[in-house]
Image: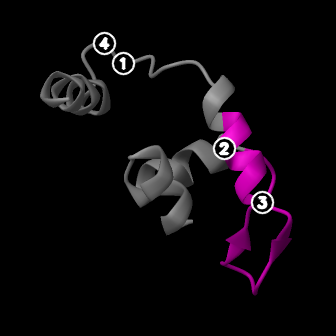
Amino acid sequence: MVDCAAYLDVSASAWRNYNSQGRTPKPVTNLGARMPLWDANEVKEWHANRPGSPVPNNPGQRKKEAKDKED
């Protein structure tokens, strides 16, 4: 879960919220009751095709824009 959140540049709690709302790919398996595992390629494909944040002027977008300006 933490790896998925880091890849998306969101907090772990944001990833948990996405998942609890059914907005992420389904985990491929679970290692215990609270440790779902996702297929990395499915997460990458989902991320590439997901719409942006519905929150205007969201912090993630601001970070991306700042990083793009540095490059």
Sequence-earlier tag: 4 or 2: 2
Are there few (<14), some (14-19), or many (20+) residues within 10 Å of tag 4? few
Residue 5 locus on image (x, y percent): 48, 55
Identify the magenta region.
Answer: 25-46
Are there few (<14), some (14-19), or many (20+) residues within 10 Å of tag 2? some
Sequence-earlier tag: 2 or 1: 2
Residue 14 located left or right of residue 1: left
Q: Is residue 8 visible?
A: yes
Q: Which residue matches tag 4?
A: 56
Q: Which residue matches tag 3?
A: 39
CA gap, disc 4 to disc 2? 24 Å
Residue 44 locus on image (x, y percent): 66, 44
- Mark nearest the camera among 2 and 1 is 2
- Mark nearest the camera among 4 and 2 is 2
Are there few (<14), some (14-19), or many (20+) residues within 10 Å of tag 3? few
Q: Nearer the viewer, residue 58 or 70?
A: 70
- Residues under numbered marks 4 and 1 in contact, where contact means CB atoms less than 8 Å apart: yes
| Residue farthest to the top, as pictured | 56
Which picture quadrant has residue 46? top right
